[in-house]
Image: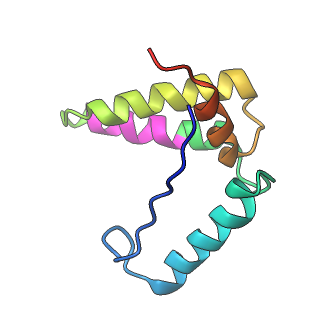
Amino acid sequence: MRFETILFDLDGTVVDSGGIILASMRHATETVLARSYTSGFSLGLMAKDIRTADELASAIGVPAPLADATAALWSTAAERLGSSADHTEIGQYLASIKPG
C-alpha cells in the first residue's frame, strides 16, 4: 500500500498556530518524505502516548474505537520495527501492510 497524500492542518482546526503548522509541514518534508526518519522521538514513546490516551478514554467511559485501532497499530509497529525506531518510521510500517 502506498500513501500519496499527506494531510496537514492548514486551516488551524487542530492547532491554531501558523508557526506550528509550518514547522509540521517542514518536518514532514525533511524526515518522512525524504525517508531520513531522524525526528529524534522514538516510535516506542509515541506508541506509549497513544496507548495512554486510549486507556484514559476507556477509564472515563468514552468509546474510542479509532483510538483502540490506532493504539494497536502503533504497538504492532513498535514490535516489528523496534521501540527505539524513529516515530516517523510509521510510514514505512504502513507502506508494508498488505490490504485484506
Q: Is residue 10 left or right of residue 5?
A: left
Q: Position of residue 9 (x, y in %)?
A: 40, 68
Q: Position of residue 51 (x, y in %)?
A: 46, 34
On-image quarter of the C terminus: top left
Q: Position of residue 46 (x, y in %)?
A: 59, 43
**Residue at 39% from the left image edge and 28% from the top image edge:** 69
Q: Position of residue 79 (x, y in %)?
A: 67, 21
On screen, 76 above or below 71? above
**Residue at 27% from the left image edge and 30% from the top image edge:** 65
The answer to which of 69 and 10 lies nearer the viewer is 10
What range of the chain is rendered magenta?
49-58
Q: Quadrant of residue 42?
A: top right
Q: Is residue 38 left or right of residue 21?
A: right
Q: Is residue 61 left or right of residue 52?
A: left
**Residue at 60% from the left image edge and 76% from the top image edge:** 23
On-image quarter of the N terminus: top right
The answer to which of 79 and 92 lies nearer the viewer is 92
Asked if residue 71 is among those painted magenta in the image, a careful observer would answer no
Tag count in the figure?
0
